[in-house]
Amino acid sequence: MLPDWAKLMRMNTLHQPASIKVHKTNGSTMDVVWEDGHAATYTFAYLRDACPCALCNEEREKQHRAVDQPVKPSEDGPFAMYKPLLRPTEVAMVGNYAIRFTWNDGHQHGIYSWDYLRAWCPCDECHAARHAKDGLEYDIDHHPPKVQ
């Protein structure tokens, strides 16, 4: 049985993962199965590009880029420096509401809440719904009113 404070914390989060698999050492993805059965695969590049920290949000705004849009490639031409594939060097749970990565590029400030990850799910169905012309229908379906 959960203590009352744990129930309150859980109620403040709309989405909870049923399972999480971060393929840190031999892969390039994180797989999440949500409690409602929805499954999502997040590539490490997608997660790094979607970092929710203030610095990354500011960079996305400067580039007029949405969270689910990749970083534009640099124009370094044929002399571009080799960059290793993005991958986390460390992964840590943040309470019962989020996950945090330390990336091999040194970045470590983003806290990816479960609600954030679910809202920016990269699967085709969720991506299409976010970019559908009828955004109201998506909002109603994915942001039910909170019961008080």
Image (cartoon, rainbow, N blue to C red):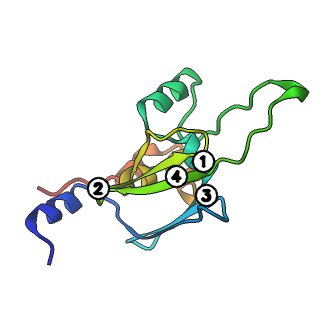
Which residue is found at the position 50% from the left and 47% from the top? 102
- Is 10 located above or below residue 78 in the figure? below
Instruction: Count residues near mark 1 (Cα–Cα under 10 Å), then give few for <14, some for 14-19, many for 20+.
Output: many
Secondary structure under the numbered disc 1 in the rendered image: helix
Residue tagged 3:
124
Specify few, some or many for label 3: CA neighbours under 10 Å numbering under 14, 14-19, or 20 or more: few
In what quadrant of the picture does the C terminus appear? bottom left
Disc 4 or disc 3, which is closer to the eye?
3
Q: Earlier in the sequence, mark 2 or mark 4?
A: 4
Q: Earlier in the sequence, mark 2 or mark 3?
A: 3
Q: Secondary structure at mark 2?
A: loop
Q: Which residue is mark 1?
A: 46
- Judged from this view, the residue extending furthest toward the top is 62
Answer with mark 1 or mark 4, whichever residue precedes in sequence: 1
* Circle 4: residue type: Ala
Circle nearer the N terminus (4, 3): 3
Residue type of the residue flagged with mark 1: Tyr
Answer whether labels 4 and 3 touch (C-beta < 8 Å). Answer: no
Tell me where residue 13 appears, x and y as whole percent.
Answer: 27, 56
Residues at marks 2 and 4 touching, judged by CB atoms closer than 8 Å = no
How many labels sit on residues? 4
Image mark for residue 129: 4
Q: Nearer the viewer, mark 2 or mark 1?
A: 1
Q: CA distance from mark 1 to mark 3?
A: 14 Å
Disc 2 designates what residue?
144
Residue 117, horizontal then vertical, whole percent:
45, 53
Q: Earlier in the sequence, mark 2 or mark 1?
A: 1
